[in-house]
Amino acid sequence: MPTSVGMQQDEQGGAHAIIARCMSAPSPIATSSTRIALGGIGLAAIGAVAASGKAVIVKLGLRHGVDPTTLLALRMAMAFPLFLLLAWWSSRRAASLGWADRARILWLGFTGYYLSSWLDFQGLQYISVTLERLILYLNPTLVLLINVLLARQRPGRWQLAALALSYAGVLVAFGHDLQREGGQIVLGSLLVLGSAISYALYLFGSGQVVARIGAVRLTAQASCVACVLVLLHFGLTHPWPLLWQAPAAVQWLSLVNATVCTVLPVMAIMLAVKRIGSSLAAQVGMLGPVSTIVMSLWLLDEPMGPAQIAGTVLVLCGVLLVTRLRR
């Protein structure tokens, strides 16, 4: 889900145009523009691959007998200082926020990072990493549906075709896992779908706020809100000492999850969007489901058959079509 806020278009027309101009008229400026574009593509790829490892690490943590809420609390406790630092850095020279924007940040932190993360971690108890990633990757299509329902926007024929492709892909993978695993797949899929809907509401709601606050500042402050909410949730449902009594392997996995799979993707994708625009960054982000499949095969030994491959291809085609239509 991959993860950037806002869907603003790049004012320079995207990295494709930059690279094309550089190839047609070599110059020092063109060489610099090429480096910027290629650097942005590289950052988007790093962010997509790093973020996709989150579910794999959660699965590895669950094997040590730790419950999802504890895994989430460890992740957010370790990421909290980094998000605080990022929030301070992004707010140094910015104007102070009004109460209305602060309330919006609270709401976006609740929906985009607390609720969606909690539902996702709960769902991973029951479904494969591949199916989880495919469901979460429906986010662009869910934002489109929210625009249809709440903003009264009428979808075009190609948008409907993109929706059909994406959801057909998830149904193919879901049907295959349902035959193998049974009823738990339904529960896990519904939890992860709830996570995807919660994050889609965050993307929908952040569209106007991000223009005033800034993408990095909004993401950092909303993440700080989510960290506090997750830790409060843990404190209300678990004894506090359990947080640091988890096995050493779980502590290390959570540290990797907090840094490599949480903070690093946020920074990499934000920098990529600044260089190449949100549309191309989203297309590069399609590496996410593919890298998830590779890691699940390598680290979890999860089965991968024709149904999962076909479902992945359909979802990627549908999301690519939605992204290109938005651009």
Image: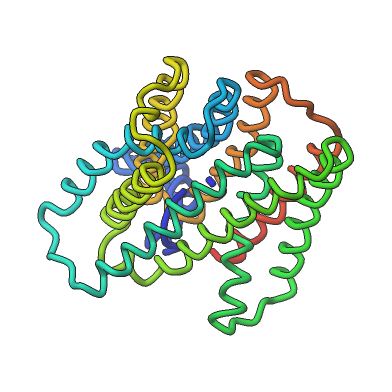
Residue at the farthest left position = 93
Q: Residue at x 57, y 24 (%)?
A: 65
Q: Residue at x 54, y 44 (%)?
A: 285
90 sits left or right of 306 in the view: left
- Residue 194 lies, in percent from the top left, at 60, 57
Q: Residue at x 40, y 45 (%)?
A: 272
Q: Is residue 109 or residue 282 the one in the foreground?
A: 109
- Residue 315 lies, in percent from the top left, at 72, 50
In this figure, which colouring scheme has been used for the structure?
rainbow
Q: Which of the 4 image quarters holds residue 32?
A: top left
Residue at the farthest front position = 239
Q: Is residue 109 or residue 51 the one in the foreground?
A: 109
In the image, residue 321 sits, relative to residue 313, either above or below, namely below
- Residue 113 lies, in percent from the top left, at 43, 51
Residue at the farthest right position = 179
100 sits left or right of 138 in the view: left
Q: Which of the 4 image quarters holds residue 62?
A: top right
4 sits left or right of 219 in the view: right
Q: Is residue 270 or residue 10 the one in the foreground?
A: 270
Q: Does any portion of residue 66 appear in the rendered image?
A: yes
Q: How many marks?
A: 0
Residue at the farthest bottom position = 152
Image quarter in which the C terminus is found: bottom right
Q: Which of the 4 image quarters holds residue 245?
A: top left
Q: Does any portion of residue 275 appear in the rendered image?
A: no
- Residue 97 lies, in percent from the top left, at 18, 67
Q: Residue at x 54, y 81 (%)?
A: 151
